[in-house]
Image (cartoon, rainbow, N blue to C red):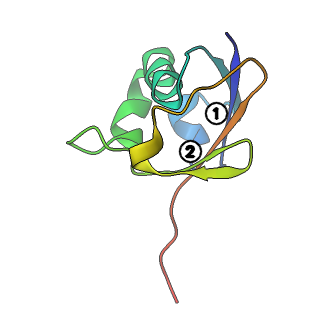
Amino acid sequence: MSVTVKLSPMLQMYADNAGIIEVSGSTVQDCLNDLSVKHPGFEKNIFDKHDVPKLVILLNSKPITTNKLDTAVVDSDVINLFVPVDGG
């Protein structure tokens, strides 16, 4: 199964400057794990020390919270990853 991961410009440096990466998996978590395998330096930027993602994750333009990483994905789904921005 092929899922497209689109990285925000701030994350591309951790993936050999790629903005779009094809990954495989049956859930959002599987896809993030596959991304980490394909780009080993990316793992420390995706997960904290408790393996909780520290990024904003969208699946087909809908937010995915850390307790929904078991959400199923299908061919042609798109996962967008962004660095959270604080401010006011």
Rate crowding at label 1 as few (under 14), some (14 to 19) or many (20 or more) other CA atoms within 10 Å: few
Residue bearing mark 2: 11
Residue 31 is marked as none
Examine the rendered structure and indicate whether residue 30 appears above or below residue 6: above
Q: Outermost residue toward the bottom?
A: 88
Q: Which residue is mark 1?
A: 17
Residue at screen point 44% across, 32% down? 42
Image quadrant containing the N terminus: top right
Give the quarter of the image for residue 6: top right
The image quarter in which residue 25 lies = top right
Give the Cα separation between the discs numbered 1 and 2.
8 Å
Element at badge 1?
A: loop
Q: Earlier along the polypeptide chain: callout 1 or callout 2?
A: 2
- Counting from the top left corner in percent of width and height, residue 2 is at 70, 14
Q: Under tag 2, what secondary structure?
A: loop
Q: Is residue 16 left or right of residue 33?
A: right
Q: Give the residue type at disc 2.
A: Leu
Q: Quadrant of residue 37?
A: top left
Residue at x-position 50% and y-position 62%:
84
Amino acid type of disc 1?
Asn
Q: Could you tell me if the residues under marks 1 and 2 are in contact, i.e. CB atoms within 8 Å?
A: no
Camera-side residue of 56 and 66 = 66
Q: Residues within 10 Å of mark 2 (few under 14, many from 20)?
A: many
Judge left or right: residue 9 versus residue 32. right
- Give how far across and how far down residue 53 sits, in percent: 39, 44
Residue 58, percent across and down? Answer: 63, 47
